Image: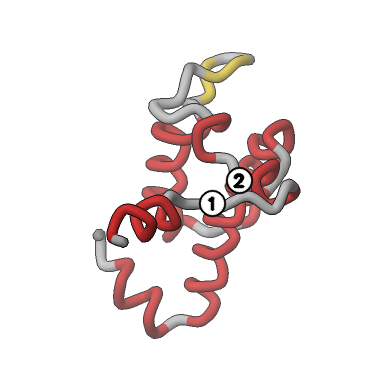
Amino acid sequence: THGFKQNYETDIIFADNIHKILALAFLESNQVISGFESLCSNLGDEYQSILDYMEDNYIGRLRGRSRRAATFPIIFWNMAARVKNNMHRTNNNIEAWHRK
């Protein structure tokens, strides 16, 4: 966790910035990369390892003028369309149904 848990729990600005990173999931798919790049430009060095992780796994590492494929492509984790269409964002409703 690189000590982020304590920062998250005690530093309201740090927690707010983490929420901004997590909010990328609610941007339109075609706005996620520009939103990520904006965060990279505006967040300090203490966020670099988090941003690197996001870039490698969820955005795609910048290579020259393009990005390599992310481990989890944006289309898999983006929630904008689900929210817009008032759909569930998790499968918890299915799990609850199976417990009946």
Crowd class of label 1 (few under 14; some 14 to 19; many from 20; radius 10 Å): some
Q: Quadrant of the C terminus?
A: bottom left
Number of callouts: 2
In front: 31, or 86? Answer: 86
Under mark 2, the amino acid is Met
The CA span between labels 2 and 1 is: 7 Å
Q: Residue at x 43, y 49 (%)?
A: 91
Q: Quadrant of the N terminus?
A: bottom left
Is residue 7 among the parts visible in the rendering? Answer: yes
Quick check: marks 2 and 1 in contact, CB under 8 Å? yes
Q: Residue at x 47, y 18 (%)?
A: 69
* 77 relative to 39 in the view: left or right: left
Q: Residue at x 55, y 55 (%)?
A: 21
Residue 26: x percent and y percent?
65, 50
Residue 16: x percent and y percent?
56, 72
**Disc 2: which residue:** 79
Splitting the image into 4 quarters, where does residue 7 fall?
bottom left
Q: Is residue 50 above or below residue 19?
A: above
Q: Is residue 66 above or below residue 77?
A: above
Dot 2: element? loop
* 1 relative to 84 in the view: left or right: left
Q: Is residue 49 above or below residue 15?
A: above
Splitting the image into 4 quarters, where does residue 79 fall?
top right
Q: Which mark is residue 89?
A: 1
Residue 75: x percent and y percent?
57, 30
Q: Residue at x 64, y 35 (%)?
A: 33
Residue 61: x percent and y percent?
48, 26
* 3 relative to 55 in the view: left or right: left
